[in-house]
Image (tube, grey):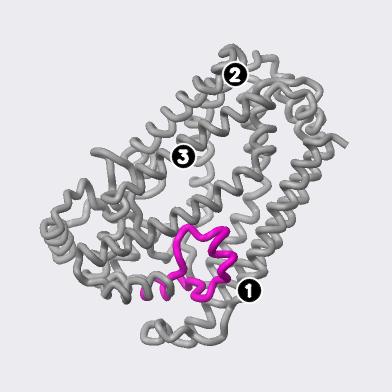
Amino acid sequence: MNAYLVIILASLALSWALDTLCAALTVRSLSPELPAEFRAVWDPAAYRRSQDYARDVARFSILSGTIATILTMAFLLAGGFNWVDTLARAAGFGELVTGLLFVGLLALLADLASTPFAAYRTFAIEARYGFNRTTPGLFVADKLKGWLLGACIAGPILLGVTAFFKHGGPWAWAWAWALASAVLLAVQYLAPSLILPLFNRFTPLPEGELRGAIEEYARTAGITLSGIFAIDGSRRSTKSNAYFTGFGKRRRIALFDTLIERQGTAEIVAVLAHEVGHATLGHVRTNTALAVAKLGLMLWLMSFFLHEPSLFEAFSLRHASVYAGLVFFMILYTPLSMLFGVAMSVLSRRFEYQADAFAARTTGRPGDLASALLNLSRDNLSNLTPHPAVVFLTYSHPPVLARIRALRGAA
């Protein structure tokens, strides 16, 4: 049997097994006893509801992941990639445009296959627990915008990378890296003002008690805030959140309107201080640098496989091409991508602790952030007792109990 095919099938099976194990461990680790730290905020009914929610999400994850893996393997073994390539070539364009059609058709098929699961998660599970506010029209609009945005960003990258690997010689990977990195940085720079507003409305925080408290925090902490916005997250979900995005003059700190509605002023200032911590401590720059470095490593490795006949044989492709090699290598790259994902999750959790400590230090009130986390965990029905293995493999944030204990230790 083709060695590449064995590796690819094993990678798909391993990915499914790890996802299934994580979901099973999540269900198994649900504890009937509410942790003492949450008893002042959570009531037993809300805690039971959070466990039901975690259980439903985990079971649905197993079902959807199993079906997706079976469909992917069946598509691969039945020659689906060659069928798509034949369709793309039938249009009669040159290799660059044919490559766009090939990748676009694959992406469209994958998205259409996943859409029923996304719809069920949104309109059944999320709605069952009172989270969903997405209308069918908004769901479809988001899909269409996502497709258009993906075409506008991924299309030029694919064209450039294909051209470089076809004509760029031994340093093609470096030219492709430069192009992809430039687009990545441009997207990150432009996202706050041009891309994210396609999906949410950003409104500058109005004058009042909250804005005054935030400005006072910034003054006493010696911090310059480039932009603080409320976003209409409630259009899609009742869950609360906040995030920091962009860099330079286009940086934005975004507070969900649901967060503003449900938290007190002191808690919101603490959450904002946490997001400021990510920017001040260089977490955004570090994550961007690591993303660029990983991109370079991937493209360098890709250069060794793009013209490997056995790789095309693994996918039953009759006509070898650079564009198909790009797609096939990305699938072959899955195990290494998973390892990088785990490493990035470890680093992300470390950054979260650092941002929490920054907020506690600059506000002088670690209890405010702890209170905000308690409220957020209740409002979002967070899993309070995740399994350590699941945290290690998949969590970008530490469990809320660990964060609260760390904050109370800093008090």
Confirm or deny contact between disc 2 and disc 1 (CB under 8 A). Answer: no
Q: Is residue 55 visible?
A: yes
How far is disc 2 from disc 1 in space, using C-alphas? 46 Å
Nearest to the eye among marks 2 and 1: give it.
2
Nearest to the eye among marks 1 and 3: give it.
3
The three-letter code of the residue at mark 1 reads Val
Q: Nearer the viewer, residue 390 or 42?
A: 390
Q: Which residue is mark 3?
A: 291
Confirm or deny contact between disc 1 and disc 3 (CB under 8 A). Answer: no
The residue that appears at 73% across and 26% down in the rendered structure is 85
Q: Position of residue 145 (x, y in %)?
A: 48, 40
Q: Is residue 127 left or right of residue 356?
A: right
Q: Which residue is mark 2?
A: 165
Q: Is residue 66 left or right of residue 214?
A: right
Q: Position of residue 59 (x, y in %)?
A: 66, 67
Q: Which residue is mark 1?
A: 27
For the residue carrying disc 1, how many other residues have a C-alpha within 10 Å: few (<14), some (14-19), or many (20+)?
many
- Residue ranking furthest to the right: 1
How far is disc 1 from disc 3 in space, using C-alphas? 33 Å
Does the segment drawn in magenta span residue 36?
no
Element under label 2? helix
The residue that appears at 49% across and 75% down in the rendered structure is 384
Quarter of the figure that contains the C terminus: bottom left
Which residues are drawn in magenta?
374-400
The residue that appears at 19% across and 50% down in the rendered structure is 225
The residue that appears at 13% across and 54% down in the rendered structure is 222
Q: Nearer the viewer, residue 216 or 232?
A: 216
Q: Position of residue 81 (x, y in %)?
A: 75, 32
The three-letter code of the residue at mark 3 reads Ala
